[in-house]
Image (cartoon, helix red, strand yellow):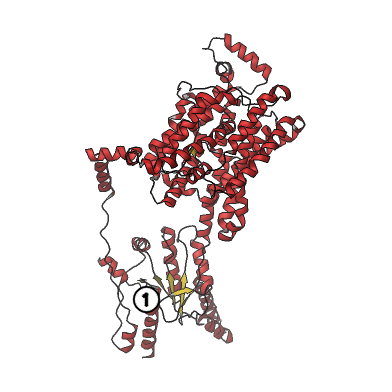
Amino acid sequence: MAEFNNVHSVTEMPEGDDAKRSFHHRMFLEPQEKKRSMKALVVKQAKKTCSCTPAKVKDYIFGFFPVLQWLPKYKLREYLLGDVMSGVIVGVLLVPQSIAYSLLAGQEPIYGLYTSFFASIIYFIFGTSRHISVGIFGVICLMVGQVVDREIQRAGYDLEPAALSILTDTAAYVNTTVSPVNRTSQELLCDKSCYAITVGATMTFIAGVYQVAMGFFQVGFVSVYLSDSLLSGFVTGASFTILTSQAKYLLGLSIPRSNGVGSLITTWINIFRNIHKTNICDLITSFLCFLVLIPTKELNEHFKSRLKAPVPVELFVVVAATLASHFGKLRETYGSSVAGHIPTGFLPPRPPDWNLIPNVALDAIPIAIIGFAITVSLSEMFAKKHGYSVKANQEMYAIGFCNIIPSFFHCFTTSAALAKTLVKESTGCRTQVSGIVTSLVILLVLLVIAPLFYSLQKCVLAVITIVNLRGALRKFKDLPKMWHLSRVDTVIWLVTMAASALISTEIGLLVGVCFSMLCVIFRTQRPEAPLLGWVAESETYESLSAYKNLQTKPGIMVFRFEAPLYYINKECFKSTLYKQTGVNPVWVKAAKKKAAKRMLREKEVDSAGNQTNISVDFVSEPLGFHTIVIDCCAVQFLDTAGIRTLKEVCRDYREIDVQVLLAQCNPSVRSSLIRGEFFKEGEDHLLFHSVHQAVDFALGAQGHSETTVSK
């Protein structure tokens, strides 16, 4: 305590009336005991973690499987109707979307149904949110599809048809122990769709492992670097890429999918080059579907408060389009591209291809991060809205297992989806029992109805995908409001959106994260640093540039630096302080030295006259203030460069007879100053708990010095 008191105590003035008036009230704060050593904390944590009691095992099991906590307390009469209603409606909406988003992920329609089926069941077991809908999400499907297409090209599946048939025939006869170039003949024993889901499932497995690892090591803090404006800009930019990838289906064009940097521009160039090959039947069908879907979706949103459930217009469109295509023989007559055979039942489970892991491990990182960031943010948003809590760590486990387990059953990556979650909430969902009902609806389709979608045109699925992008594309309408609230967030949104659309989704996400971090750094590099004035009849000091009618104390400058003081902004701190006070002590010292040398030189040549008097006048010119009080209330921390800068500033000003006082330092800053030996024995620089105390002390000290001089 002695060390702390030495810092905060004040030397008493000599006795007398003036001294009593200027006496500064001393405040003593006793610091808390220091925390135990790191070794002791590690030992304590290890003992706590390794101890095993029946109660602890029970808590662990119930925490890892939240369904065991809430399902026994399920209120059948109160919850069942809402859960069944919402589960059926979400299931009906999910069937056409699962088929449509399968194309986006580069997969056959059946695999989208598998993914939605398993995701709902697994989240029911592991999830802590009562409302979110976990399943297929457009942006994740896009990112999966880009990797799948790249690996398909590497494996040689996108060769010319003639070469492909020759290789297929050859592969049927060659010994499978032979390894041709690019493993082409060996891989062709598994056809293109089989290899596509192998790539998708392998990447899904790795993404799930990443997510579980992040939950285990409690590194959910990574999601804090994905701000709302960044995620919104990323989703909007990716929506342009999704729209571009589906445009060829609207026109019935058969062009290769572009991947990598600038894929959006490359795809549109290919579309316009092949525009003369447009399938008129697909174009008319797409136009008619847009004509039905967009107005109906808008009506659903406009009257959602009056409707008990949204009209499942997508399902009606799919059924009508399938019937029209089947009975109109659109595939045979006009060459329209259709979904093709969708088998019933389930394929036997198969592990991921371990040989593919090195190829897709890096691609799975952004997919894992985006997946858990969206899931956790939606979980917390709806939990706050409905007054319950979710465990972010457990949510990472849940979404991780929603990817790991289904990857053995021919599924691709999933996450929470906002649109389906909103539908689920608005239709009466109370618990994740609604997810089980949704899975039963999809199971019915898988076992019975799936083959009936054989004649469904792919352009209809593309229309469904594009129409569901409306929410993301509408963010442009919010830009004026966002600009009014925060220009920095708006710029982050625009940069992330443009990079995600024009470069690539993965690079766009990285650009957005780096740019948002740079914005934080720039804001601390050039922070606000005003002079403060006194609010009359109070102990408050506020910015002179922000408020009127503030008073200043004679001879005292109060300066506030509104950022941490560290190596990036130390020069800004010094230059701003010199600018605001109007005095650069380094220049003043240099001017004094220069004037002193001139005087000495003039004396040596025995030519002292008016010039000497001018020099003396310059050197002795008063500064207009004797004390600078630095308000440190907004300085969250100091590094070694910051401490060194404060030392330099205090030393430089002291050499021109100006004292510097620090006020309102938080405990972290005080501790840094003490460790950095900022306070030395005999120094007059003290810490004050308020600006008012520092100003009173400066006024008292100056009054005492003037009294001493007059005597």
User: Furthest residue to the bottom?
Assistant: 711
Residue sticking out furthest to the left:
53
Q: Position of residue 63 (x, y in %)?
A: 32, 40
- Corner quadrant of residue 249: top right
Q: What residue is rendered at 27% in x and 57% in y?
A: 34
Task: Check the image and report above or below for 185 versus 485.
Answer: above
> Residue 697 in the image: x percent, y percent?
37, 78
Residue at figure coordinates x 47%, y 39% from the top left = 85
Q: Nearer the viewer, residue 156 or 554?
A: 156
Camera-nearest residue between 616 and 191: 191
The crowd level at tag 1 (other Cα within 10 Å; few <14, some 14-19, many 20+) is some
* Res 196 seen here: no
Determine whether 533 is above or below 273 in the image. Answer: below
Image: 407 above or below 226: above
Which amino acid type corresponds to the residue marked 1 in the rendered image?
A: Gln
Is residue 260 found left or right of 663 in the rendered image?
right
On the image, numbered disc 1 is attached to which residue? Answer: 693
Is 637 in front, or is 372?
372
